[in-house]
Image (spheres, grey):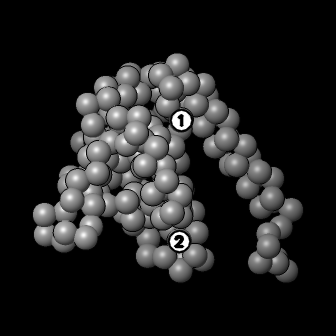
């Protein structure tokens, strides 16, 4: 009988997934350091740039699985660095939305040109990438249900191979 905490086969798989994620993130961080950006700053910049409408700090926090106060502090630092700007919502005056500042636009262009993610992901064929996407969506959906959250697609953009 399997326990809820996992079995002998679940733990090594979890550890492999965690170590892979960490190693990929570190490779990206090393690349981002050249431009003075952290991984989380780059994630915020990509979210803000690729969103269809300007996001609120709460929306950014939700999409990054971070606490609202943590994202608020991060956005404050990013605003001081000239990466983002806070804009008052036109409809709800007590709410702000986040847009990229000129330096944020430049950082987006630089971060998009970096090669670590492409080099790592290209080690999988297109078919394997599709399968990985499906498996990760399944795991993310289950994690959301355990956190009592409604599952939403993990990215703003659609799957690259569905274009």
Residue at the extreme left of the image, as rendered: 90
| Residue 107: numbered disc | none
Name the quadrant containing residue 78. top left
Q: Does 78 sit above or below residue 137? A: above
Tell me whether the residue at label 2 lies in contact with that at label 1, contact meaning CB atoms closer than 8 angstroms.
Answer: no
Estimate the x, y position of residue 53 in percent, counting from the top left: 20, 55
Q: Can you give x and y, in whole percent of width and height, for residue 138 in the image? A: 52, 63
| Residue 81 higher or lower than 62, as above or below | above
At 53% across and 35% down in the image, what residue appears? 38
- Classify residue 161 as left or right of residue 142: left
Quadrant for the N terminus, please: bottom right
Residue 57 seen in the current view: yes
95 vs 35, left or right, is left
Q: Residues within 10 Å of mark 2 (few under 14, many from 20)?
A: some
Between 60 and 159, the residue placed more toward the observer is 60
Q: Nearer the viewer, residue 8 or 82?
A: 82
For the residues labelled 2 and 1, the Cα–Cα distance comes to: 26 Å
Q: At 51% from the left edge and 63% from the top edge, which residue is drawn?
A: 69
Total labels drawn: 2
Residue at 82% in and 78% down = 3
Secondary element at tag 2? helix
Residue occupied by mark 1 = 38
- Tag 2 residue: 144
Label located before the other in sequence (2 or 1):
1
**Residue 107: x %, y % from top left:** 37, 28
Q: Give neighbour class at mark 1: few <14, some 14-19, many 20+ (Cα, 10 Å).
A: some
Q: State the SS at label 1.
A: loop
**x 79%, y 69%: residue:** 6
**Is residue 64 at all visible to an observer of this figure?**
no
Q: Indicate the position of residue 25 as horizontal and vertical percent values.
A: 60, 37
């Amino acid at each position: 009988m399997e326990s809820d905490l996992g079995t002998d086969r679940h733990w090594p798989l979890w550890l492999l997934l965690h170590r892979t994620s960490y190693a990929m993130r570190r490779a990206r961080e090393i690349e981002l350091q050249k431009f003075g950006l952290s991984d989380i700053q780059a994630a915020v910049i990509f979210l803000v740039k690729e969103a269809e409408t300007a996001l609120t700090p709460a929306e950014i926090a939700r999409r990054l699985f971070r606490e609202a106060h943590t994202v608020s502090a991060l956005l404050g630092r990013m605003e001081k660095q000239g990466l983002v700007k806070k804009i008052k919502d036109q409809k709800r005056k007590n709410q702000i939305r986040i847009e990229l500042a000129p330096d944020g636009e430049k950082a987006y262009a630089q971060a998009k040109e970096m090669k670590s993610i492409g080099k790592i992901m290209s080690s999988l064929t297109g078919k394997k990438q599709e399968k990985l996407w499906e498996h990760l969506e399944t795991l993310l959906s289950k994690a959301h249900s355990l956190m009592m959250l409604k599952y939403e697609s993990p990215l703003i953009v659609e799957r690259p191979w569905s274009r």
